[in-house]
Amino acid sequence: MRLVVLLLIALPLLADDFFEKKIRPVFATKCQVCHGAKLQSGGVNFTTAEGFTKAKGKIVEVLSYTGKVKMPPGAKLNDEQISDIGTWIASGAVWPETAAVAKQPEQTHWAFRPVAKVTPPSVSDPKWVKSPVDAFILAKLDEKNLKPAPPASKLALLARDLRSHGIASLVG
């Protein structure tokens, strides 16, 4: 009886793990450009279980390049990837309830996080701070026992600007 209970608890976890390690990466790298959140070619979306439902019946045939439609275009998936997807579908195509978007690397980038108010840190020389960003810079410098460089002269700033535009020959 204990074994049955353990299996009932463990199987969904194993299915989730299989999906996250074997299925989602293939969908994310090979399918979601054309069948993702922004674009759903043929009405198929590989970012959600609901969106996947349209392709479920034909996906192995399409991925195996045996039918009229061949996906992904240009390069067939390797046999192991096709087999994994077939196994996943045969075992019930368990799609974890966790949000796919949160697990995609590009979605963990700072630009995708909600805007939050952050209080600038206190610094050793508040007079040096001209904007809140300066406080963060000076705090990092303080952390490493470094001092900010002195302000650049107008001539030095002009020379930097000209160099950045490829006009270095005019500057000494």
Image (spheres, grey):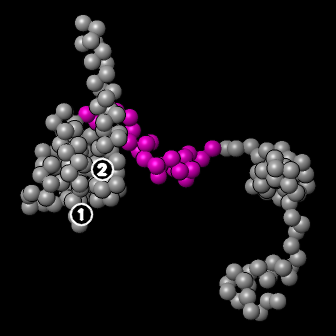
What residue sits right under mark 1 in the picture?
Answer: 75
Q: How many marks?
A: 2
SS category of the residue bearing label 2: helix
Amino acid type, residue under disc 2 in the picture: Phe
Question: Callout 1 environment at 10 Å: few (<14), some (14 to 19), or many (20+)?
Answer: few
According to the image, label 2 marks what residue?
A: 27
- What's under tag 1, amino acid-wise? Ala
Q: Residues within 10 Å of mark 2 (few under 14, many from 20)?
A: some
Q: Is residue 93 above or below residue 52?
A: above
Instruction: Point out residue 104 in the picture as x, y percentages from the top left corner.
Output: 43, 47
Residue 70 shown in magenta = no
Q: Residue at (88%, 69%) from the top-left corner?
A: 151
Q: Image point 57% across, 50% down: which residue?
A: 110
Location of residue 116 (image quadrant): top right
Q: From this viewpoint, which residue is outermost toward the left?
A: 67
Q: Nearer the viewer, mark 1 or mark 2?
A: 1
Q: Nearer the viewer, residue 86 or 156?
A: 86
**Horizontal arrangement in the rendering, residue 125 relative to residue 8 (left or right):** right
User: Which residue is at a point 27% across and 50% down the rendered structure image?
Assistant: 45
Say if mark 1 contacts mark 2, CB within 8 Å.
no
Q: Quadrant of the C terminus?
A: bottom right
Secondary structure at numbered mark 1: loop
Quadrant where the N terminus sits is top left
User: Percent position (x, y) of residue 62?
Assistant: 15, 55
Q: Is residue 39 visible?
A: no
- Give the magenta range: 94-116
Quadrant of the rendered image containing residue 29? bottom left
Name above or below for residue 148 compared with residue 51: below
Q: In the visual, does 101 lie left or right of 139?
A: left
- Residue at x 83%, y 44% (from the top left corner): 122
Q: Quadrant of residue 130?
A: bottom right
User: How far across and how far down the image is residue 36, in percent?
Assistant: 32, 53
